[in-house]
Structures are given as structure tokens and as C-alpha cells.
Image (cartoon, helix red, strand yellow):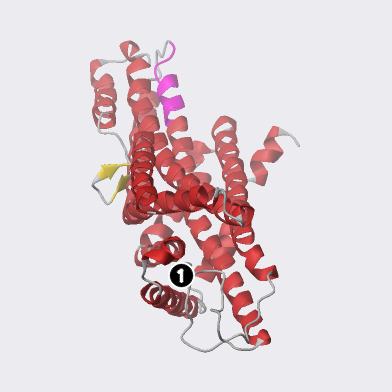
């Protein structure tokens, strides 16, 4: 496939998979099924968290410490999913506005040259691959977490033993027949897979938006590098138009980045707290499983869950670091362009861009802390400290 045909094949940064699955999570407006899906997700989240609460209260003792930590992990994992969905519902208008801005970038004539379109198509292709990888990882996490329980031969008619489920939950109704038990297990399994898809889509959308705005910043830097790069002579009017185009592009980038921040700041705050506890708790489950009779089963059950939780924390922190570094480069590009070929009046435009770029674009956790790779290191450090405490309490 030629370069031109590759560019023409991509006209949207959002993956087709994301577009298909978003209405299932009640996010896409104008669909009659959206309200039904929202009611379903709220009702199912309340029911699942209530079952976790019943289990936690009924097993609250030192001898059940391992099971309580496992219960806490699945409780927080389900809580993260519904938190992401609620934040998307609350900020749905902002999300649609951001996606509309992305569509406008694809149709903007200023971007419709070979270099600009090729750059955007390359970002879109990267986003599509990342989305597929995230969805596969989230699906495999649930498959490995649930397989042991699905294939286990459990005698549900034995009233002396507790009926095990995939998660550490206690149902508010009796399950005393094999068909009913299998139905509950399958329902739990399907619900967990679809819920994990929702968590994965939220992460994929974040990376898609960040990579898209990063591509727009690359285009802006190229425009700045080409501004006054040669003897301009009678091209003063062209410089004025180009400078106006640069200012407008910079304003769109700032507005787009602020929309991303508003969409994800509260999600990031909850994730920052919950993932710290999850990484610590899952690490505890893996470490304490070593040497036990069912060590292989327990480690395989928790290892991919631990990996995806770490990866999620890393993705949010990487997105913040990427946005921060890209915004710095705009100021550097303005400073390094051939500003000495411009008249003083024209070069003042570059001064405004440099000054505005000094206030870097960031992602934050609840407007309280910037998301950077340093933040990820602090999450891992805090999780390690809490893990030491849990091992001491064992």
C-alpha cells in the first residue's frame, strides 16, 4: 500500500472497536439504548459491590485475612469500572466536543498536506494497535482469573461447605443446584469480561486523545520551524496568515488538552488511590501464595491482574508525561525558528507563543498532583511500603 493510500485509509484517530463498544457502556448520545445500559451498569455495580460487602462482613476475622484481601481487590476493580463510566456520563458533552474537535482536525484544510495527514494517519494506526493490545490484555486477565473456578468440580449440595464463586462474594439468595450454580458462574464471568472491556476502553480513549493532540503539536512545531526559514522578500502577507494559523492551532491544542484534563482528572484521582491499594494487595496475594499447595493456580490467577493494574497506572502517568514534554517542545520550536528574519512586529507573535508554552499542559489527579513518571514511581514505592506492612500482619 502506498503512502497516499495509507493516509486515505485512515480518517479517524478513534478505533472502530471503541466506537462500537461505547454505546454498550451508555456513553454515546442520541441512542435509545443508552439509558437502558446506564441503568443496567448502575444496578449491576450496586449488586456486585453489595455481595462483596456481605462477604467481607461475614468473614471479618484474622484467619480469613488472605480471602479478605482478595475480596478487597475485586471490590476495588469493580469500583474503578463504575467510576470511569459515571465520570464519562457526567462529562459526556465534553467527550463529544473533544471527539468533534478531533474530527475537525482531520477535515481541517491546514492539515491536509501530505506531511500533516501522514503524521495523523501514523498516530491513528498506533492508537488502533494500542487499543487492540489493551482489549486483549484485559480479556486475558479475566480468562486467567476465572478459568480455575469455571472448570472446578464443586458440590453445591454439600451444606457444610461454602459455595465458591469467581470473586469473593456472598449471594443474597441460595444457590443449591448445579444448573443454578453454573448459571451464576457464567453470568459472573461474562459480566467481568464486559466490565473489563469498559475499563480498557476508558484507558484506550485517553491514549488516543493524548496521541492525537501530540500529533497536532508535531504539526505545529513543523509550522514554526518553516516560519521565516528562508528569504521571504515579498511574502510578508503569507507570514501574517501563517502566524495567525499557528496561533489558532495553538489555542485549539490548549483547549483540547484542557478537555482531556477535565474528562480524566477525577478518574485519575480514584485510580491513583485504588491502584496503590490494588498493586499492594495483589503483590501480597502473589507473595503469600508461593510455597502453598495451590501456588501455581493462585499465582496465575493474580499475575495478569497485577500486570494490568500496573500497566493502567503506568499508562495514565505516561500520558501526563507525554503531554507535558510535547507542550515544552512548542516553546523550544518557537525559540529555535528563524525569528531574526522577521520584523519586530511579526516576531512578537513568537514571544506570545513562547510565554504561553512556559505554562505546560498537564494531566492531574483531582487537580492536586501532576501525572508523570515520577508519580508512577511514587505509586510503586507506596505499594511496596504497604506490602511490607501486610506481610508483617500475616
Q: Could you say which quadrant of the image residue 238 lies in? A: top left
Disc 1 element: loop
| Mark 1 neighbour class, 10 Å CA radius: few under 14, some 14 to 19, many 20 or more | some
Q: Nearer the viewer, residue 273 or 280?
A: 280
Q: Is residue 139 left or right of residue 305?
A: right
Total numbered labels: 1
Q: Where are the magenta residues, as a range? A: 220-230
Q: Quadrant of the C terminus?
A: bottom left
Residue 277: give x, y in percent of width and height.
37, 53
State whether residue 15 appears in this view.
no
Q: Is residue 88 left or right of residue 24?
A: left
Instruction: Please determine whether, in this image, residue 22 is positioned above or below residue 270.
Output: below
Q: Which residue is mark 1?
A: 29
Residue 38: give x, y in percent of width and height.
45, 75
Q: Image point 42% across, 45% down: which residue?
A: 316
Residue 295: give x, y in percent of width and height.
60, 53
Q: Is residue 270 left or right of residue 201?
A: left
State whether residue 185 appears in this view.
yes
Reply yes or no: does residue 226 show up in magenta.
yes
Q: Quadrant of the N terminus?
A: top right
Reply yes or no: does residue 130 show up in magenta.
no
Instruction: Please determine whether, in this image, residue 373 is positioned above or below residue 266.
Output: above
Residue 371: give x, y in percent of width and height.
34, 41
Q: Nearer the viewer, residue 5 or 81?
A: 81
Q: Image point 52% across, 57% down: which residue?
A: 201
Q: Image point 63% across, 58% down: which residue?
A: 144
Q: Could you say which quadrant of the image residue 84 lies in? A: bottom left
Amino acid at each position: 500500500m502506498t503512502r497516499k493510500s495509507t493516509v486515505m485509509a485512515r480518517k479517524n484517530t478513534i478505533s472502530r472497536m471503541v466506537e462500537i463498544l461505547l454505546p454498550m457502556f451508555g456513553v454515546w448520545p442520541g441512542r435509545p439504548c443508552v439509558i437502558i445500559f446506564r441503568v443496567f451498569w448502575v444496578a449491576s455495580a450496586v449488586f456486585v459491590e453489595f455481595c462483596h460487602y456481605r462477604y467481607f462482613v461475614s468473614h471479618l476475622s484474622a484467619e480469613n485475612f488472605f480471602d479478605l484481601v482478595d475480596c478487597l481487590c475485586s471490590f476495588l476493580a469493580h469500583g474503578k469500572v463504575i467510576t470511569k463510566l459515571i465520570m464519562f456520563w457526567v462529562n459526556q458533552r465534553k467527550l463529544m466536543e473533544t471527539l468533534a474537535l478531533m474530527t475537525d482536525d482531520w477535515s481541517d484544510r491546514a492539515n491536509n498536506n501530505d506531511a500533516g495527514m501522514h503524521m495523523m494517519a501514523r498516530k491513528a494506526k498506533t492508537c488502533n494497535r494500542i487499543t487492540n493490545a489493551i482489549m486483549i490484555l484485559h480479556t486475558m486477565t479475566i480468562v486467567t482469573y476465572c478459568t480455575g473456578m469455571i472448570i472446578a468440580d464443586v458440590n453445591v449440595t454439600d451444606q457444610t461447605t461454602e459455595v465458591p464463586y469467581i470473586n469473593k462474594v456472598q449471594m443474597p439468595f441460595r444457590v443449591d443446584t448445579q444448573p443454578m450454580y453454573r448459571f451464576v458462574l457464567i453470568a459472573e464471568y461474562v459480566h467481568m469480561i464486559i466490565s473489563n472491556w469498559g475499563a480498557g476502553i476508558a484507558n484506550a480513549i485517553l491514549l488516543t486523545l493524548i496521541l492525537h493532540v501530540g500529533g497536532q503539536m508535531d504539526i505545529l512545531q513543523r509550522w514554526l520551524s518553516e516560519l521565516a526559514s528562508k528569504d521571504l522578500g515579498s511574502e510578508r502577507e503569507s507570514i501574517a496568515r501563517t502566524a495567525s494559523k499557528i496561533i489558532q492551532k495553538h489555542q485549539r491544542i490548549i483547549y483540547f488538552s484542557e478537555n482531556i484534563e477535565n474528562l480524566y482528572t477525577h478518574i485519575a484521582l480514584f485510580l491513583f488511590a485504588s491502584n496503590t491499594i490494588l498493586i499492594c494487595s495483589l503483590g501480597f496475594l502473589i507473595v503469600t501464595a508461593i510455597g502453598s499447595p495451590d501456588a501455581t493456580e493462585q499465582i496465575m490467577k493474580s499475575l495478569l491482574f497485577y500486570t494490568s493494574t500496573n500497566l493502567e497506572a503506568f499508562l495514565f502517568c505516561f500520558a501526563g508525561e507525554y503531554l507535558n514534554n510535547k507542550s515544552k517542545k512548542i516553546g523550544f520550536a518557537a525559540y529555535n525558528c528563524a525569528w531574526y528574519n522577521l520584523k519586530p512586529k511579526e516576531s512578537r507573535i513568537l514571544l506570545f507563543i513562547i510565554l504561553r508554552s512556559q505554562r505546560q499542559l498537564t494531566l492531574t489527579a483531582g487537580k492536586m498532583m501532576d501525572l508523570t513518571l515520577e508519580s508512577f514511581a511514587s505509586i510503586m514505592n507506596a505499594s511496596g511500603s504497604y506490602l511490607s506492612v501486610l506481610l508483617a500482619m500475616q
